[in-house]
Amino acid sequence: MEIKVLGPGCPRCQQTEKIVKDAVAETGVEANVEKVTDVMKIATYGVFGTPAVVVDGEVKSVGKIPKKEEIKEWLAKPLSSFEEGK
């Protein structure tokens, strides 16, 4: 799973990155968390407000700090899809 935290490095962006990493650690999901600070790269996602969170190419949150429970739901969705395919 690829998770990108988009933002220039402001305190809200740093807090979002920490919450995302905490949620990944707590769920045990195997995920690569990347911080994207380049404004041009952020714009390629169609995001013009930060912080933003992108999970496997899908923009999940823009302009706010998501709650940890919300992030955990995003992390659980792919697992549910995988289990249904068994």
Image (spheres, rainbow, N blue to C red):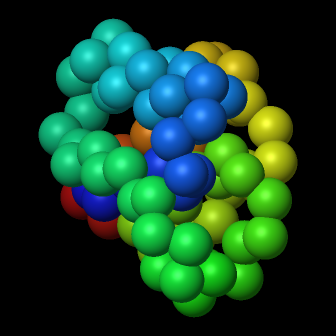
Where is residue 67 drawn, in percent x and y? 70, 21
- The answer to whether residue 46 is seen in the rendering is yes
- The answer to whether residue 72 is seen in the rendering is no
Where is residue 9 drawn, in percent x and y? 51, 41
Q: On the picture, is 40 further left or further right than 48?
A: left
Where is residue 19 drawn, in percent x and y? 50, 20
Report the residue at 30% width, 59% height from top: 2
Quadrant occupied by the N terminus: bottom left
Where is residue 81 drawn, in percent x and y? 43, 58
Report the residue at 29% width, 45% height from top: 33
Report the residue at 56% width, 72% height from top: 39
68 over 78 or under it: above or below = above
Q: Which residue occupies the foreground of this view, 46 or 78?
A: 46
Report the residue at 80% width, 38% height from top: 64
Total count of labels: 0
Q: On the picture, is 25 further left or further right than 76?
A: left
